Image (cartoon, rainbow, N blue to C red):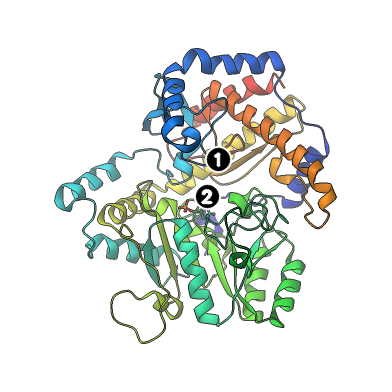
Amino acid sequence: MNPSTSSNTEYLDVKAIYGKLDKLISQPIRPVRRDKMQAYLDYFETHCTKSKEMIHTAMNFIPGGVQHNLAFNYPFPLVFTKAEGAYLVDLDGNTYIDFIRAGGPAVLGSNNPVVQEKVIEVIKECGPSTGLFHEYELKIAELICRHIPSVEQFRMLGSGTEAVMASIRVARLATGKKKIIKLGGAYHGWSDQMVYGMRIPGTGRFDAHGIPRSCSKHSQEVFPNDIKALERKLRWNRLRGGTAAVILEPVGTESGTRPVDFEYNTKVRELCTKYGALLIFDEVVTAFRIGLSGAQGYYNVMPDLTVFGKVVAGGYPSAGGLGGKKEYMSYLAAGLQGAKKRAMVGGTMAANPLSSAAGYYTLLEIEKTDACTTAGRSGDRLTQGLQRLIEKYNLPFVAYNQGSICHLETSATMFVRVNMKRPWTLPGALKEIKARKHMMEEMGAAYMAEGIVTVAGSRMYTSSAHTDEIIDEALARFENVFQHM
Ligand SMILES: Cc1ncc(COP(=O)(O)O)c(C=O)c1O
């Protein structure tokens, strides 16, 4: 696959980025000036009163008053009523440039009218679901198999989390082995086995509250981009029952927050083949965003299984799926056929007509309008603009992107070093994380008060709806914040 079909114009200088991030984490935090931060907090009190009131009520009925982990919640979450193109409007009527993109799926921009019309047609015809087969399930499966090089068959599921669970089950059946290796810091959904080494590498079961130790028994993590560490783990496992799969996001953990060298994926592929483990690409974020052929098309690496989510239902509910070679996908045969042992998967709402049609028309629209490339160019423009601002104001911040996935690290919370093997260092590390996390929240609030919605104050997804003018307007607003650090 030719990388030029992807939105990425040139590959990251991974070494330089880590150098800058190391420098950022070694310095004290550089938050927004206190008087300016107070003015930003005042914005919420004066301009977002209706949101404040509703969230206050929600606190009584919804734990924490908010339901999404990426929801911006400092000083309090806002309530959004309208999403269109590149914009969001809150309950008080304030308009924002939207870089959260529904958590990733809105590559075409929010509420794309072509997709919306088709979805309404389906709902009018048969309602959102029947529990039985619908033509759109076939249409989307065919389209995904056409675009994603390694996918011969596709099964639609309810979410990325479910699809990761299914991929692990298939890998264990196919290999007869148990261990699953992930890259430290990666998020692969919230299933028992994957709440392991989340956010910060080396943290193991740190977040595994309510999950028995036995559930993480076969979960392992290695440091991202360290190919030697991966081989050591695979070799170690060989003497202890073997590795069923290595699972990773090809762009690096957390949508490329920790990017990997261009050759890393190829080397992981070679190691998986050498040690008889399946290679699972988690393309929940990257499929149909990095390019129509996914990140695997861009890196030209064929995984055995690919996990889908987000764009696969075009921002509509029930976004998940697993694809791969027939020999592995046959473990997921539903219904009554199939002689071999089956991996149990299911879901009342999996592959419903609404999600399948939404995904199908979203992919067609992305193809027709070359949306990944346009969104990628917007990501380049945004990142280059941020880099100029960082230089102009002599800030230690780091901006980098892979096409339409942009990172702006100002406090580098996820780069705090945690060493669980030295428990006496943990209180210090936790204190550092707390301070850096608070700065990240403040940055998110400052951007929001300037009319920009980000993912947790440090990540932005662009879409084909982000024109040059919109990006330049966003940069002017970022500059308002950067002037007051
Ligand atoms: C890389 C990755 N894998 C898996 C998931 C889980 O997907 P879902 O939220 O659909 O369960 C996410 C969600 O953000 C993700 O970013």
Kind of residue at disc 1? Gly
Res. 409 visible in picture = yes
Helix, strand or loop for disc 2:
loop
Q: In the image, residue 402 lies at what x, y percent? A: 59, 48
Q: In the image, residue 364 lies at what x, y percent? A: 33, 53
Q: Residue at x 62, y 19 (%)?
A: 480
Q: In the image, residue 66 lies at what x, y percent? A: 47, 35
Looking at this view, name the residue that lies furthest to the bottom: 339
Give above or below for 326 relative to 28.
below
Q: Residue at x 65, y 75 (%)?
A: 270
- Do labels 2 and 1 touch, CB within 8 Å? yes
Mark number for residue 379?
A: 1
Q: Which residue is mark 2?
A: 7
Give above or below for 49 relative to 105.
above
Res. 292 visible in picture = no
Helix, strand or loop for disc 1:
helix
